[in-house]
């Protein structure tokens, strides 16, 4: 359950970062403005490091134990147990036989039960519960075959109280990277108190003998059945929750690898889950590696969130690399969208020949990234995405005979910063949406002339104009259109996110949340 929550929450955030930089795929850059930075493209297929680290805290342990017991209770079934026979050799009286039949084990009572989940020394966790109650009924028949013959029958109601369970489990990853839990050994079940009431029999003198049977073979049979159901139910139901979490998420022409990178690590105060968390093409791995070699520290907060997920910046770099490889980071602007900036007469101070050769004409602007955007995450600057783009200015398609004629091309380098990242909810404690407000760092903008079909272009004079375009048009378009409504955090089966928060660390984003089990 913890793994599925972290995966969905992290994946949603990454998609949001992708959306903030995505542009229309209709244009392929004809000119490239590239920096001297290059990703490490050597084969790392055998040395990739997991990019997602999820931590389940002790706060979750307590809640998970209650959910586990509820799962057992909901799936606990009334059951007919095999008939039981026993006998006693009573001095003077002789051998007395007792048959128990139609034995029915009824529901499990958990109303006053205390539960817990604690790490154990075998590398797993121990699920415990105390205060269990259950109820059984049966028909009994006693008889003596020798002289003097005695026989009778009746109904017995047996209540088992003060029950306890100790069940050791190991969290693991299967061969495909799915999270799962397996039993270390059968659940240990015991009941400390038994009360028996009988009806439809006058044999009060046999009550103590009958009671000894219920404290012996009958109790053993009931205890064994409760153990069997706990042993079978808990892993099955938890694994059912985890089975719906995919290991590969198929997206539009690329994939997100969400499989576990090895078995979960159980520590005294937490459980750590390492996830590959890599965007990739179907036939090609991303060349970027995890930025840090950190491991989740112990959490000493008495009110720590149940789940903490750390998203390494390399995940965002892999996402932008995939988008770049698929030529997704492209956008065409028309004069109807930007009426002043894309009119030739307004460019006389930068491109002197433009209004003279094409007076009063409208232009189009095609924007495409020249190389994958590079992300850095720091507490001081937040999430900063650095990139280079090509800007190709052409005459508007609507101009007769001159439509789409290339005029000049510029290269531009800039930083885009996530000014604010937060979460909001549409209703109390549900319908959470990830909200992002971007800021184009205008001081970081550099402009270079790549080519011109209309004479000289004064790139230096463009610096202030491009900065104005970035802050007044591009930034407003991104925040006002793409990011205005935020992005809904995905639904996780049976799990509701509670009070998620986001914090920025050095090299990664930390997402913390509580969860609620819902049917």
Image (spheres, rainbow, N blue to C red):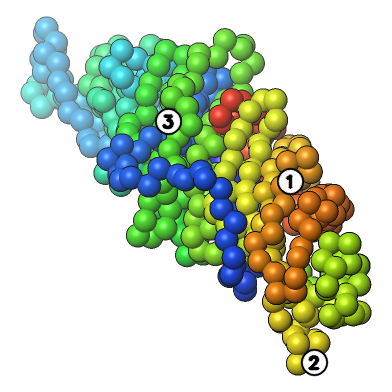
Label 2 SS: loop
Image coordinates of residue 191 in percent, x first then y, are 37, 16
Give the mark nearer the N terminus: 2 vs 1: 2
Q: Nearer the viewer, residue 324 or 514?
A: 324
Marks 3 and 2 in Cβ contact (< 8 Å): no
Tag 3, which secondary structure?
strand
Q: Residue at x 20, y 25 (%)?
A: 98
> x, y percentage for residue 114?
51, 17
Q: What residue is pinned by disc 2?
A: 400
Residue 64, above or below 454: above
Mark 3 or mark 2: whose residue is earlier in sequence: 3
Image quarter hosting the C terminus? top right
Q: Residues within 10 Å of mark 3 (few under 14, many from 20)?
A: many
- Left or right: residue 500 versus residue 402 is left
Residue that badge 3 annotates: 273
Residue visible at 59% across and 69% down?
30
The answer to whether residue 517 is left or right of residue 81 is right
Q: CA distance from mark 2 to mark 1?
A: 35 Å
Looking at the image, can residue 12 be seen? no
- Is disc 1 surrounded by few (<14), some (14 to 19) or many (20+) residues within 10 Å? some
User: Disc 1 marks which residue?
Assistant: 445
Query: Residue sitting at 42 percent across and 30 percent down?
Result: 273
Q: Quadrant of residue 8?
A: top right
Category of crowding for the residue at label 2, using alpha-carbon neighbours closer than 10 angstroms: few (below 14), some (14–19), many (at least 20)? few
Q: Residue at x 50, y 16 (%)?
A: 297
**Is residue 397 placed above or below 195 in the rendered structure?**
below
Which label sits in the foreground, 3 or 2? 2
Q: CA distance from mark 1 to mark 3?
A: 40 Å
Query: Residue 400: where, in percent of width, then height?
Result: 80, 92
Q: Position of residue 491 (x, y in %)?
A: 60, 49
Task: Identify the residue at the far bottom of this view.
Answer: 401
Are discs 1 and 3 less than 8 Å apart at CB? no
């Amino acid at each position: 359950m913890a793994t599925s929550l972290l995966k969905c929450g992290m994946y949603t955030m990454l998609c949001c970062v992708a959306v903030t930089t995505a542009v229309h795929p209709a244009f392929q850059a004809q000119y490239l403005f590239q920096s001297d930075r290059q990703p490490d493209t050597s084969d790392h297929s055998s040395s990739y490091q997991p990019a997602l680290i999820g931590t389940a805290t002790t706060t979750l342990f307590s809640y998970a134990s209650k959910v586990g017991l509820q799962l057992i209770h909901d799936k606990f079934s009334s059951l007919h147990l095999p008939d039981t026979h026993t006998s006693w050799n009573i001095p003077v009286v002789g051998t007395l036989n007792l048959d128990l039949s139609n034995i029915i084990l009824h529901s499990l009572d958990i109303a006053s039960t205390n539960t817990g989940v604690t790490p154990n020394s075998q590398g797993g966790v121990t699920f415990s519960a105390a205060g269990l109650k259950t109820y059984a009924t049966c028909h009994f028949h006693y008889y003596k075959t020798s002289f003097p013959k005695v026989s009778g029958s009746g109904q017995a109601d047996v209540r088992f109280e003060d029950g306890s369970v100790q069940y050791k489990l190991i969290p693991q990853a299967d061969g495909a990277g799915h999270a799962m839990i397996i039993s270390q050994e059968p659940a240990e079940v015991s009941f400390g108190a038994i009360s028996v009431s009988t009806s439809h029999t006058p044999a009060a003198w046999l009550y103590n003998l009958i009671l000894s049977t219920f404290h012996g073979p009958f109790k053993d049979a009931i205890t064994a059945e409760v153990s069997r159901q706990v042993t079978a139910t808990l892993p099955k139901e938890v694994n059912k929750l985890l089975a719906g979490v995919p290991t590969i998420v198929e997206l539009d022409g690329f994939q997100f690898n969400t499989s576990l990178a090895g078995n979960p690590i159980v520590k005294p105060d937490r459980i750590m889950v390492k996830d590959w968390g890599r965007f990739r093409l179907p036939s090609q791995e991303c060349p970027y590696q995890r930025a840090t070699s950190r491991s989740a520290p112990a959490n000493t907060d008495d009110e720590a969130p149940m789940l903490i997920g750390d998203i390494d910046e390399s995940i965002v770099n892999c996402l932008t690399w995939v988008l770049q490889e698929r030529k997704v980071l492209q956008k065409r602007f028309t004069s109807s969208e930007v009426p002043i900036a894309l009119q030739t007469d307004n460019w006389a101070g930068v491109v002197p020949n433009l209004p003279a050769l094409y007076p009063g004409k409208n232009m189009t602007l095609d924007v495409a990234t020249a190389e994958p955007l590079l992300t850095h995450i720091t507490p001081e600057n937040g999430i900063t995405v650095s990139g280079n783009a090509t800007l190709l200015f052409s005459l508007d398609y609507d101009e007769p005979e001159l439509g789409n004629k290339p005029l000049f091309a510029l290269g531009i380098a800039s930083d885009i910063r996530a000014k604010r990242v937060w979460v909001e909810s549409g209703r109390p404690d549900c319908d959470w949406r990830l909200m992002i407000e971007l800021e184009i760092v205008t001081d970081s903008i550099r402009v270079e002339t790549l080519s011109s079909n209309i004479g000289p272009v004064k790139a230096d004079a463009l610096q202030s104009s491009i900065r104005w375009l970035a802050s007044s048009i591009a930034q407003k378009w991104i925040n006002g259109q793409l990011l205005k409504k935020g992005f809904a955090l995905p639904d996780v089966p049976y799990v509701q996110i509670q009070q998620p928060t986001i914090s920025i660390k050095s090299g990664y984003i930390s997402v913390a949340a509580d969860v609620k089990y819902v049917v």
